[in-house]
Image (spheres, rainbow, N blue to C red):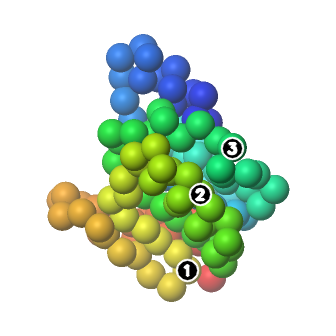
Amino acid sequence: MSLTAIRNTRMAGQRPALVFVVIGPHAPVHDDNTLVLVADDDRPEAMDWRPLVGLPVVLIQPAARPALAQRAIDAMHEVGVNFIGTADPLGALPLDDRPGLEQILTKAREQLCPR
C-alpha cells in the first residue's frame, strides 16, 4: 500500500490496524495493504508521511541501510509518526506493550528479512 492509498483509506473513514514501513530491498511478499516501501533511490524527506500519523507503525530494515533509515525516521518523526516496534535480520524489538506485538514483529522479520 502506498502512502496515497493509506491517505485514501483514511479519508474513507477506515484505518489500517498496522502499517509496516520497509526500508530498502526486501523479500518478495504479498502486500496485504499494510506495506509502505522506501526504496534505495527514494527521498524519504520528500514523502508525505502525514497519513501515518495516529496509526501503529512498525519499521522493518531487511538489509542495512542506516542512512536511508535515519532519513525516513527523521521525516516521519517530523510530522508526528510514532513507531510501536522495529525488526531487522538480527532481531525484533517491540516499543509498545500491546498484546501480540512481539509475535507480529517476529513474523514480519521472518517474511521480510532474508538471512
Q: Residue 97's spot in the image, x, y percent?
A: 18, 64
Which part of the image, by quadrant, shows the C terminus?
A: bottom right
Label 1 element class: loop
Q: What residue is disc 1 on?
A: 89
Which part of the image, by quadrant, shows the N terminus?
A: top right
Q: Residue 91's spot in the image, x, y percent?
A: 44, 81
Q: Residues within 10 Å of mark 1 (few under 14, many from 20)?
A: some
Q: What's the distance in space between the residues labelled 3 and 1, CA to CA?
A: 27 Å
How many callouts does the rendering have? 3
Q: Earlier in the sequence, mark 3 or mark 1?
A: 3
Q: Residue furthest top?
A: 12
Quadrant assignment, res 65: bottom right
**At label 1, which amino acid type do we have?**
Pro
Up the image or down, 39 lies above or below 10; here it is: below
Up the image or down, 112 lies above or below 93; here it is: above
Q: Residue furthest front?
A: 78
Q: Residue at x 64, y 75 (%)?
A: 66
Q: What residue is disc 3 on?
A: 46
Label 3 element class: helix
Q: Earlier in the sequence, mark 1 or mark 2?
A: 2
Residue 32 appears in the figure: no
Q: Residues within 10 Å of mark 3 (few under 14, many from 20)?
A: few
Residue 43 appears in the figure: yes
Q: What residue is disc 2 on?
A: 72
Up the image or down, 106 lies above or below 77; here it is: below
54 horizontally vs 35: left or right? left
30 horizontally vs 82: left or right? right
